[in-house]
Image (cartoon, rainbow, N blue to C red):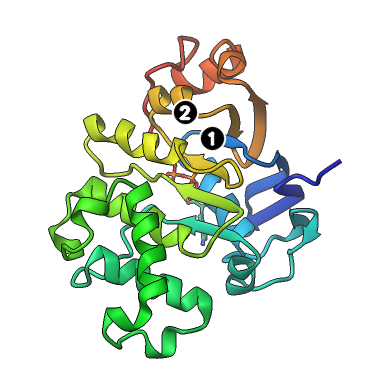
Amino acid sequence: MTAPALATRGLDKQFGSLRVAQSIDIILPQGARHALIGPNGAGKTTLINMITGMLRPDSGRILLGGEDITALKPDARVKKGLARTFQINTLFPHLTALESVTLAVCERRGEAGNWWRPLPNHADAVDEAYTILAAMQLGPVCLRPTHALAYGQQRLLEIALALATRPKVLLLDEPAAGVPSGESAALFEAIAGLPDDITVLFIEHDMNIVFRFATRIIVLVGGATLVEGTPQEISSDSRVREVYLGSTQPHGARHG
Ligand SMILES: Nc1ncnc2c1ncn2[C@@H]1O[C@H](COP(=O)(O)OP(=O)(O)OP(=O)(O)O)[C@@H](O)[C@H]1O
């Protein structure tokens, strides 16, 4: 049997007296498209930070493709195939989308020391960067400086940068945060079109998006997993309804 793409075992974390992770066990099978949901302060970003190594758990283990990565630094986890995006925009505003992604490709290849040479000197890296940008629907705007891109396109560029690391597992922390609601479905269409060999876990507050794009949903409340299931199971779970709306449907609910 193949190991899950990502698994956590008994992750615990406390900030002072606040328990933000309580024995969290999650399993992402290869190719999963799972959503992580929960009210504000439930511990979603804390969990992602522990998985990526930005935060050390008090106890528990993290397994990437069956390998224990709990002790590895964040950059070592990236090299092993774990990539993430952040809630906030972390882009270089004056580089073009193509320059940014080419730089990320060069970084992965260990060629970043001379990335400033004219782009034609990095033809392979440019080709790879363009392919990634085209998959994220950014081909036509790849020569524009980042600051001139629409906000939704900037968020897609962040995903493109994560893809440049050739991830096996991609963690997306509110990829559509700040994007006008009419554009977030297009952004998630691009995410849904990622190849099956990339496993995805995304945090998202818009339940319409979650129910449309997630194959399974993990509900975190008070640092603990309340329930995990298919969109159908979650939408009919009375505990989830209670957390979100005090007993009505979670569909269409928006926290945050
Ligand atoms: N470095 C820190 N020190 C102390 N408390 C923290 C720290 N980081 C997060 N917290 C607290 O831990 C709890 C969980 O925060 P976290 O950001 O993980 O929640 P979240 O589910 O991602 O929330 P949101 O949906 O608002 O992004 C919150 O009460 C938060 O205030």
Residue 35's mark? 1
Cα distance between the residues tagged 2 and 1:
8 Å
Q: Which residue is mark 2?
A: 213
Q: Residue at point 52% right, 82% down? A: 110
Q: Locate residue 250, reporting x and y percent.
A: 46, 17
Q: Quadrant of residue 225?
A: top right
Instruction: Tell how many labels.
Output: 2
Badge 2: residue crowd in 10 Å (few <14, some 14–19, many ≥20): some
Residue labelled 2 has its Cβ within 8 Å of some atom of ligand 1: no
Q: Residue at point 36% right, 75% down? A: 123
Outermost residue on the right side: it is: 1
Is any part of residue 121 visible from this angle? yes
Q: Nearer the viewer, residue 135 or 21?
A: 135
Q: Nearer the viewer, residue 255 or 147?
A: 147
Q: Nearer the viewer, residue 179 or 108?
A: 108
Q: Locate residue 117, reporting x and y percent.
A: 30, 88
**Amino acid bearing label 1:** Ala
Q: Secondary structure at mark 2?
A: helix
- What is the quadrant of the N terminus in the image? top right
For the residues labelled 2 and 1, say whether their Cβ atoms are less than 8 Å apart: yes
Horizontal placement of 174 versus 58: left or right? Answer: left
Horizontal placement of 122 versus 140: left or right? Answer: right
- Position above or below: 242 against 43: above
Is tag 2's residue or tag 1's residue first in the polypeptide sequence? Answer: 1
Residue 146's mark? none
**Amino acid bearing label 2:** Phe
- Position above or below: 231 against 148: above
Q: Locate residue 168, reporting x and y percent.
A: 61, 54
Q: Quadrant of residue 74?
A: bottom right
Q: Locate residue 106, reporting x and y percent.
A: 44, 77
